[in-house]
Every structure is written in C-alpha cells, then in structure tokens.
Amino acid sequence: MSIWTNLRIILRKWNDRLNFIEKFIIFALLVAFLFPLTLPNSYHFGYIEIHPPKLLCPHKQFNLYRNANGYFNNSEQLATVDYGGRYHNKHCDSNRKQRVAIIVPFRNRTEHLTIFLQHMHSFLIKQNQIDYQIFIIEQADDKPFNRANLLNIGFQESLGLEHEIDCFIFHDVDILPLNIEQTYSCTKLPKHLCSYLDKFRFVLIYPTLFGGVITISKEQFRHVNGYSNLYSGWGGEDDDFYQRIKHNFGLIERYPQNVARCTMIKHGHEGQSNVERQKLLANVLDRISTDGLSTLNTTYVRKSIEFYPLYTKIQAILNE
Ligand SMILES: *[C@@H]1O[C@H](CO)[C@@H](O)[C@H](O)[C@H]1NC(C)=O
Ligand SMILES: *[C@@H]1O[C@H](CO)[C@@H](O)[C@H](O)[C@H]1NC(C)=O
Ligand SMILES: CC(=O)N[C@H]1CO[C@H](CO)[C@@H](O)[C@@H]1O
C-alpha cells in the first residue's frame, strides 16, 4: 500500500470524525502556518529586503582614507582609473561581472562633483565587483532642472558610447555610500540603494521611496520605457518611476538598514519645485508608452561629449 493510499484513509477517517467547526479551525491553522512560507521571508509593504549578492571577488585590502570632511579619497587608487572615468576591474575576472554605467544628473554643483568622484571611485575600486564608467549628464541651459529627462539622456547617450553596458545605476551627486557591504550592482529586480540616509537618522522615510540612488538592468529600463520626461522642476519623477516599476515588476528591492547607509552632502535649497507634479502623478500608467525613452529624442539636443580623467561629461540642452 502506497503512502498516498494510507494518507487518504487517514484523511477520510478524520473527515468523518471532525465536525465543521473543528475542520475549519484546522484549515485556518494550516493556512496561517503555511502562507508565510510562500512569501519571500523578507517581504515588506512595497519592497523586498534582500541581502547583498555573494561577492564575485573579495574586497580589495587598501585603506579608503578620509579627507577633512570624512569623505573617501584615495589618490593612489584614483590614479588607476582610465580616462573618461572608466574602470576595468583587472583583479576580478569572473565572467559574471557586470558592466555598469553610473549616470549622474548635474548642474551647478561643482564642489559636490569633486567630492563625489573621489569618494565613488575609491569606494567602487575597493568593492571590486564591477567594471564601470561614470557619466555626468549636465543640463546646459537655464530652464528648470529636469532630473528624470537627464537620466533618460544618460541611458541613451552612454549606450551610444559603450554598447556593452548591461546595468545602470542612476545616482544623485550629493549622496555617498558609507558601508562597503552595500554592493553596487544590478540584482534580480530594480533596487533602491542608499535607502537609509544620515540626514533622516538612517530611517526609511516612506516604504515606496525610490529616488537618490537606484540600480536597474538595461532590459528592465527599456521595458518600462525609462523615466517620464515631463517632470520639470524638483520632485515627483521618482514616484512616477516607482509606479512604472510596480506596474511591470510588482516590487522593488532594498538591502537591510545596516547595509544601505549613506550620507548626504549638505547644501542649500533644492531649487524650483514642480507645481504640476500632482497632476502628472494622477495618470502615470496612462502615459507609460507615450512618455519616456520612446519620445526622448524630441526632448533634447546633445551639446557635447567630453572626457576627463575621472568622468565622461555629456551636455544636453532641453527643449522645454
Ligand atoms: C584628495 O586627495 C588628493 C591627493 O591626495 C588631494 O590633492 C585632494 O585635495 C584631496 N581632496 C580632498 C577634498 O581632500
Ligand atoms: C533616438 O536617436 C538615437 C540616435 O541619436 C537613435 O539611436 C534612436 O534609435 C532614436 N530613438 C528613437 C525612439 O527614435
Ligand atoms: C548660478 C549658476 O552658476 N548658474 C549656472 C548654472 O548652469 C547654467 C548652465 O550650465 C548656467 O547658464 C548658469 O549660469
């Protein structure tokens, strides 16, 4: 007699002996016990908490050094960066190594840029996981700053220069990682990095926060048609992007609170805020296919591409 036949006999006996209420209670207990096992064990409202991927290569053993303000600055390591801010990781030969573009929207924050470049290169070289290049996308006009439009431009223009890129990290210039365990690379789903900022006492300010620093694969970014180009002025574009991601992939990922810690360089006011944003946020899903990478070419003119020792600069003039 097979185990299944046995089981069926036992179940039938139980079925005869228990009344409806008893059966219901047993059923409810089973569901309560088994249901959590079907969820990822670190599921949170709006996101999944994941651990950093297994290291492809060990972290490098040099000292990061800190400058007077506490930011990383290792000049010896900076000297190993190739022109255009490109780093080919010769010490990590894994064929699973990702080729990453770090895309930084920018205008008039030169003092932040210097700190950012020294800190990021020192950090990424020590972390020793990826090949990468830093692209600074400068809005070369006086119209309201359009961060999301610049990120789309960075995606398109960097791929035009380097077809091999497979992972994108969209990065504000004033946010810097503190913990070397916070691995900068793409994982299964689009991911929020630097979820826990010193400015907010290392607390997640809201569960769907998806601004500042994010990672996303080339295919995933194309799949959601990139960012909206319409968020001219400060704010809203990252919430729009979260909705695009949620609609297509269900969830975003984050690292735990003790890992995804970052500092924000202090500065004054954010600039002109976007008064239209509530109106735009009301119909995000209707605009996915008609506002983004598909319409990007109508939104800007490329002014220049310049190569510097620690970065590649792309200047764009926006049409609106
Ligand atoms: C970073 O290090 C270099 C070389 O040691 C030095 O010239 C530069 O002033 C340092 N930057 C800061 C912001 O301390
Ligand atoms: C936009 O222009 C680039 C070249 O500058 C081209 O490769 C791309 O296909 C264009 N995209 C669209 C959607 O027309
Ligand atoms: C205050 C300031 O420096 N503004 C400059 C910001 O950048 C734009 C475009 O590069 C310049 O036109 C502004 O003069």
Image (cartoon, grey):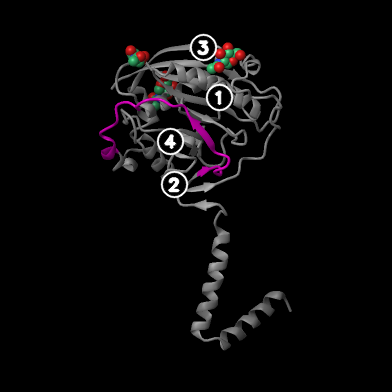
Gap in angstroms between the C-alphas marked 4 and 3? 27 Å
Sequence order check, earlier mark of 3 and 2? 2
Residue located 46% across and 34% down the image: 221
Sequence order check, earlier mark of 1 and 2? 1
Q: Is residue 189 above or below residue 165?
A: below
Left or right, residue 254 beside residue 303? right
Amino acid carrying label 3: it is Phe
Q: Which residue does the numbered mark 2 point to in the structure image?
A: 207
Locate residue 244, reporting x and y percent: 40, 41
Comparing 252 with 198, the one in front is 198
How many neighbours does mark 3 have within 10 angstroms: few (below 14), some (14-19), or many (20 or more)? few
Secondary structure category for the residue under label 1: loop
Image quarter of residue 211: top left
Secondary structure category for the residue under label 4: loop
Q: Which residue does the numbered mark 3 point to in the structure image?
A: 307
Locate residue 261, reporting x and y percent: 54, 37
For the residues carrying marks 3 and 1, which lies nearer the camera in this image? 1
Q: Is residue 242 magenta?
A: no
**Which range of residues does the magenta coloring cover?**
253-280
Q: Which residue does the numbered mark 1 point to in the structure image?
A: 71
On residue 211, the disc is 4
- Taking the image as four quarters, which one is ligand 1 found in? top right
Amino acid carrying label 4: it is Gly
Amino acid carrying label 1: it is Tyr
Gap in angstroms between the C-alphas marked 3 and 2? 38 Å
Gap in angstroms between the C-alphas marked 4 and 2? 12 Å
Amino acid carrying label 2: it is Pro
- In the picture, the quarter occupied by the N terminus is bottom right
Whether label 4 touches label 3, CB < 8 Å: no
